[in-house]
């Protein structure tokens, strides 16, 4: 019987880790083409418009807490937008808001709010205690 080399074992483990990472990313709802994050007044907003669920991330890069007042879309917002969240975010913390059929944490709505057919005319508008931040879809 032939012994298996360390290189072969390493290759198999690497391939298994790659498949595990790919499966994890798809369950996180990562966008196929993630948009560039928008930063203003020490707050970063990043939107994944084509993900399921759609995801709007907000990160507080400041040294003091902020309040996220509401989150909504830019292009032809629904009549129930923006969605009030009233969330306090401590320094260095981030929060993820979800929308769409697969949304299950910090749910804004179970409907899709971002229009994927209009490119950079669509995006997220987040109003905070330090001002509004807009991130566009890719």
Image (cartoon, rainbow, N blue to C red):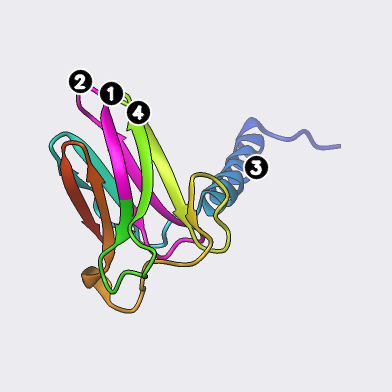
- Judged from the image, the secondary structure of the residue bearing numbered disc 1 is loop
Residue 90 in percent (x, y) is at 32, 24
Mark 2 or 3: the one toward you: 2
Per the rendered image, the range of residues in magenta is 47-70
- Is 58 within the magenta? yes
Tell me the CA gap for discs 2 and 1: 5 Å
Q: Nearer the viewer, residue 31 or 75?
A: 75
Q: Which residue lies furthest to the bottom in this view?
A: 117
What crowding class fits label 2: few (fewer than 14 Cα within 10 Å), some (14-19), or many (20 or more)? few
- The mark tally for this picture is 4
Where residue 63 is drawn, which disc sits there? 2
Where residue 99 is drawn, which disc sits there? none
Q: Nearer the viewer, residue 60 or 85?
A: 85
The reply to whether residue 138 is visible in this rendering is no
Tell me the CA gap for discs 2 and 3: 45 Å
Badge 2 or badge 3: first in the primary sequence: 3
Badge 2 or badge 1: first in the primary sequence: 2
What crowding class fits label 1: few (fewer than 14 Cα within 10 Å), some (14-19), or many (20 or more)? some
Residue linked to disc 4 = 93
Mark 4 or 3: the one toward you: 4
Residue linked to disc 3 = 12
Q: Are marks 2 and 3 in contact (CB under 8 Å)?
A: no
Residue linked to disc 1 = 91
The residue lying at 15 percent from left, 43 percent from top is 131
């Amino acid at each position: 019987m032939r012994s298996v080399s360390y290189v072969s074992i390493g290759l198999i483990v690497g391939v298994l880790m790659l498949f595990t990472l790919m499966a994890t990313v798809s369950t996180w709802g990562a966008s196929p083409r993630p948009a560039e994050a928008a930063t203003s007044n020490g707050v970063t907003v990043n939107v994944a418009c084509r993900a399921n669920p759609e995801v709007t991330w907000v990160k507080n890069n400041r040294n003091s807490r902020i309040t996220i007042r509401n989150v909504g879309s830019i292009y032809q917002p629904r009549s129930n937008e923006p969605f009030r969240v009233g969330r306090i975010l401590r320094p260095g913390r981030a929060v993820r808001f979800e929308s769409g059929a697969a949304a299950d944490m910090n749910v804004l709505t179970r409907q899709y709010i971002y229009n994927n057919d209009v490119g950079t005319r669509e995006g997220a508008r987040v109003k905070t205690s330090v001002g509004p931040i807009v991130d566009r879809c890719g």
